[in-house]
Amino acid sequence: MSRNDPPAIQAIKAKAKAMMQTLADQDEPQVRHNHCLHALAQQAGYKDWYTYQAALREQAGLAPTKRLESRRRAR
């Protein structure tokens, strides 16, 4: 978790971590953190985690991360 993440992103990342741990406890160790982030993004109605993260950053009045900017340019 980045110190620069707004509270909404920190909360989603914490949910994803908890989801991953729950699944690991249920013998689903192959589920990775990014899979959980993607699932949470889709539940919230977004295409993927990057789109969800960009929307959350925008709602918090922050610019997209450098990684998000480079992904946008690549499209």
Image: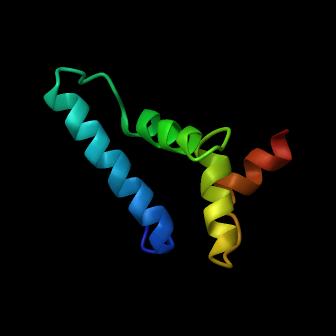
Q: Can residue 65 be seen in this view?
A: no
- Please tell me in which quadrant of the rendered image residue 14 appears: bottom left
Res. 31 visible in picture: yes
Q: Which residue lies furthest to the bottom in this view?
A: 61
Residue 22 drawn at (x, y percent)? 21, 36
6 over 68 or under it: above or below = below
Residue shown at 62%/52% (left/top)? 52
Q: In this view, does 71 lie to the left or right of 26?
A: right
- Residue drawn at point x = 52 percent, y = 38 percent: 38
Q: Residue at x 24, y 24 (%)?
A: 29
- Image spot of residue 3 (x, y percent): 42, 73
Residue at image coords 58%, 38%: 42
Establish if 35 lies above or below 67.
above
- Decide if residue 5 is on the left or right side of residue 25: right
The quarter of the picture where the C terminus appears is top right
Q: In which quarter of the image is the N terminus?
A: bottom left
Quadrant of the image occupied by residue 49: top right
